[in-house]
Image: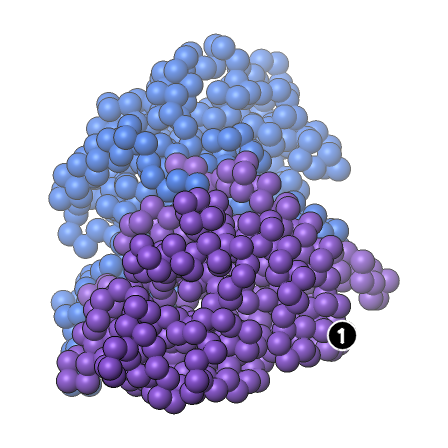
Chain colours: A purple, B blue
Amino acid sequence: MNFDFTEEQEILRKMARDFLTKEFPKTLVREMEEDTTGFRPDIWKKMAELGWMGLIIPEEYGGSSGSFLDLMVLLEEIGQGCLVSPFFSTVICTSVLLDIANEEQKKEFLPRIASGEKIFALALTEPSASYDASGIETTATQKNDGYQINGVKLFVNDAQVADYFICVTKTNLSSTPEEGITIFLVDANTEGIKVIPLPTIADDKQNEVVFEDVIVPKGNMLGRLNGEWQAVERLLNFASTAKCAEMIGGADWTVESCVAYAKERVQFGKPIGSFGIIQHYLAEMWADISHTKRLVYHAGWLLEQGLPCAKEAAMAKARMSDVYKRCTRMGVQIFGGIGTTREHDMGLYYRRARQALPLFGSPDLCREKIAKELGL
Amino acid sequence: MDFRFTPEQEALQKEFEGFCKEEATRAPEGWIGGLSAEETDEGWAYHQSVVKKVAAKGWLSLPWPKEYGGHGHGPVEQLIFNEVTAYYRVPALPFHFMTVAAGIMVYGSEEQKKEWLPKIARAEINWAEGLSEPNAGSDLASLNTTAVEDGDDYVINGQKVWTSGAHRSDHIFILARTGTRESRHKGLTFFINEIGPGIEFRPLIFMNRSHFYNETFIEDFRVPKRNIVGKVNQGWYVMMAGRNFARANISFAAAGKRDLEDLIEYCKQTQSGGQVMAKDPLIRQKLAEFSIDFEAALKFAYYLSWLQSKGQDIAAEAAACGYFSSELNLRLANTAMEIMGLYGTIKRESKWAPLYGKFQDLCQWGSGFTIAGGTTEIRKNVIAWIGLKLPRG
């Protein structure tokens, strides 16, 4: 048993924190929230130089063969720093490529992801806003030597800057939904694709993406025809646990900042942190996060080991989402009036917590999954 | 990071499980574990028989240093033992034995170690705990019971309360004031002695009618000086040594997980409103949430034992562990009663009682676990003051 991060991981953490503090101050976070692309190519390039996009890509494809826990360390810092960038989107798409792309596809795309040349976005969810196979209504039908995609994808994060989409489609209309799922890699510049911004609470660059008679060459199919619903499930475990790591970073920021503020903010002649009620709010937040981290790291460790983790990932996502929501709510309360303003950092986290909660499985959905696992 | 046990730890776990599964079959009907060992003669007899076997296997002294007859295991191995016994509801540990043993190991004289530790490891002693007083609960350091030097003895006078299991005990440990009242925790001394003249116990009946706690009246109770553990006025630290030894509390979480499994089984088998309870979306959500929370509590306890095995001070983490798990168990008991509806209120004596009326019982016992050994509020204070370094008001 060992609950520590490795020395290398601690170095990675420190480097990431230093980089984000220097290159991505909260003033820039706010600027990027207002910016329509939310993208700074110069900073993206530096992130690539630091090896972030190539972190989980094997060395033979231009990456550094890092582990999932390495990625979690980085995502904790990204969550702490509120980085606005297509990093998360690109990395979860990378996981799909690593999982089911053929050798030729890996050789073509992975090095270009690692170098920062190409940005990927996940086109999975639809107006059904569901993570079930039955929620996929976008179709891909065989046409000449390729496939023709039609449908609407909703909540496509970073579509506005993506070079490629990983697009999940329905290719068998007569089978069960799970037995008719095919995944395509779609060039974002293909004719028939329309990207419409979808404004959301976190200003995190969500989009509606309309696919109208979009033609994709056969060679862009990832994995098997009709056979990749399980890959979507693996992707969801990966993405939700990765999102949990981001949430840990945000939750840690909340407690640390609130503790610091409670020590300096004086009312009634005393720091508010000397009042029992504020101490107990903070103690509860800290205890809640400390407990929940073990669930998240356990899911992450299972993922890293390649062990089954559906139940553990659901446990982590359900509890982490709820804890982040509660902590940021209490965080605003502790900061008081100033915490409710656009200019204060607390709101950045408060809004992000509410965005992260339903992504890749809401707590209710996760708990229902667990109920099934419990044989209920 | 690595969540696996070592092969040796896995083997130990297997051995403990084998033992506990076997012992669990001998439990009295309707046995709910925990404090029920002290309640009835039947429960006490079961408890004593298990404890003797555990002692014979040498498992009472798993983490003790080898020189004192222990196995030199770490906090993780101890936690595995505690988890398995709590999960199988096997009453494997004598009450309070670790508090005294740890105090003696860390602060006792060579003579005391030779005299007491082997007897404790063989489970030959049942201890009554003399710590809390009517006016010294959370503020234990303000306690009033006095010990005054008289020749080769100290003479103790005062009153203790919540003396758990005193009516089943033969020995008592007492934290008494030897310094001034103002000296607070620096004026206390730790005494151990056989129970004798000058000690009177009166039952303090719990709300569920159980006799577990007692009031203790102490009048001119004489304790020889050689039964002082540590130095005079060092008693607070002697007591804390015991707490430090077993900081990661996993018994609440492990026992609660088992109770949850019973509740899940009940919901699978019980009809309500024309359908089986397990199909009710609200009940599914609640049960899933508890299973997540218990998993978090168990993992957190192991995390603590890991920190402790590295020699880290875990006061704040231990406080978090204690309050999280005790509150969780109480919440489970209350939710279980709600799910069961009217049936949830029936006590074990009735043939109508589901699961031997366990949850109405736990709902009462549980309200004590969020108080005993540190209230939820004190535990949050510890997190705030020690963990987060917030100023004391």
Nearer to me, A286 or A51: A51
The residue sitting at 28% across, 28% down in the picture is: B8
**Residue most toward the front?**
A144
The residue sitting at 47% across, 48% down in the picture is: A63
Residue A201 % position (x, y): 58, 80
- Image height check: is B159 above or below A259? above
- The quadrant of the picture occupied by the C terminus of chain A is bottom left
Q: Chain of mark 1?
A: A
Residue B9 % position (x, y): 30, 31
Look at mark 1 in the image and give the residue it sits on.
Answer: A343
Answer few, some or many: residues within 10 Å of disc 1's Cα (few below 14, many 20 plus, some between 14 and 19).
few
The residue sitting at 21% across, 77% down in the picture is: A180
The residue sitting at 17% across, 36% down in the picture is: B18
- Image height check: is A223 above or below B383? below
Q: Secondary structure at mark 1?
A: loop
Is A361 on the left-hand or right-hand side of A23? left
Nearer to me, B244 or B236: B244
Is A106 on the left-hand or right-hand side of A112? left
Residue A268 % position (x, y): 84, 66
Q: Is residue B40 visible?
A: yes
